[in-house]
Amino acid sequence: MLQSLASNSCVRLIQSHKSTWYFVSLVLGYILYLIFGAVVFSSVELPYEDLLRQELRAIKKQFLQENECLSEERLERFLKKALDASNYGVSILNNASANWNWDFTSALFFASTVLSTTGYGHTAPLSDGGKAFCIIYSMIGIPFTLLFLTAVVQRIMVFSTRRPVMYIHRRWGLSKPLVAIVHATLLATLAVSCFFLIPAAIFSALEENWNFLESFYFCFISLSTIGLGDYVPGEATNQRFRELYKVGITVYLILGLIVMLVVLETFCELQQLKQLRKMFYLKKEKPQDHLAIMEHDHLSFTTVSNRATAYTEGKTPTFDSVPALASPNDDPMIQ
């Protein structure tokens, strides 16, 4: 008996806090996913890092042996200066001296990466004035960009998703959730083809040292606004039509970001995903329920007050009259 009561109370407790348990499981799942990613990245990349360190040590040792007049301390200072400049996008190599990082087209590309929060990191402001302006420019520009993207995506969604789904639903009488799923799948396939596969093929042809996988990797990292900066187009030596190339990449990034947001919004409007999201949200108290509770409390308080007043005045509170029974046989319980 006690075990049955305990199990029933546990079930009622879980059901009454179902969204909380779902949220806790979501947090635990996210933490486990982070740990899983860290384990995989560490196991895959750590051997390559160790190999690269060994190669650099061997090259440095061989260079010092061939140039005995140069001390290791002077070499360290020179390499540190060169690496610091490289972090700001400035290279000391002869074949890279022709490319400027802050001409108009490069600055336009940098501004687009800042406002879209992609931030490749291959180029950064050098002066204190540039850093201060970057802060102010981003504080104004990022909310402005969010407003711009929201307005554009809202208008595109009407013509790309809502109207086609509603037209097919009304024209052929198909289930609206089914039509929405098929439409979202086709839209995602079209977006992947036009903004991932085809651009990856173009980048692999234009960039000398990029294969198709590296080009696809750049497209994904850029349009997902991760922006690691290990691959940046238009930075090769003697790049033909570099200014026009940079402008084209800027347009590609803006259009691709808009398309990605349209696809995400299309999937978010699916009924199945809406139900899935509601599992982790706090339930909102309905206004009519809150009003009913307030009315019930008000009536209870009024009844108690009236009875208390009647007792203080020496009156007996009236109750509903009970009809007298003519005989015991008239009692419904006996019958």
Image: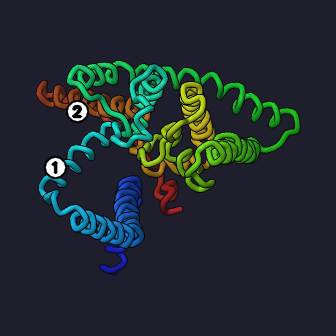
Is residue 257 or residue 228 the one in the foreground?
A: 228
Q: How many labels sit on residues?
A: 2
Is residue 283 or residue 230 the one in the foreground?
A: 230
Image vertical order of residue 289 relative to residue 56, above or below: above
Q: In the displayed structure, does residue 80 sit left or right of residue 124?
A: left
Q: Quadrant of the N terminus?
A: bottom left
Identify the mark at residue 251; answer none if there is no mark: none
Gap between marks 2 and 1 measured at Cα:
87 Å
Q: Residues within 10 Å of mark 2 (few under 14, many from 20)?
A: few
Q: Looking at the picture, which amino acid does disc 1 mark?
A: Arg
The secondary element bearing badge 1 is classed as helix
Q: Which residue is mark 2?
A: 304
Residue 92: give x, y in percent of width and height: 33, 41
The secondary element bearing badge 2 is classed as helix
Quarter of the image where one finds residue 226: top left
Identify the mark at residue 77; answer none if there is no mark: 1
Residue 103: give x, y in percent of width and height: 43, 22
Residue 211: give x, y in percent of width and height: 60, 54
Residue drawn at the location 80% of the way across and 37% of the way down: 169
Question: Are dots 2 and 1 in contact, CB under 8 Å?
Answer: no
Q: Residues within 10 Å of mark 1 (few under 14, many from 20)?
A: few
Residue drawn at the location 43% of the way across and 34% of the way down: 286
In this rendering, does residue 36 appear at all?
no
Quarter of the image where one finds residue 302: top left
Q: Looking at the picture, which amino acid does disc 2 mark?
A: Val
Tag 1 or tag 2, which sits nearer the N-term?
1
Image vertical order of residue 45 relative to residue 265, above or below: below
Is residue 162 or residue 254 the one in the foreground?
A: 254
In this rendering, does residue 283 appear at all?
yes
Mark 2 vs mark 1, foreground winner is: 1
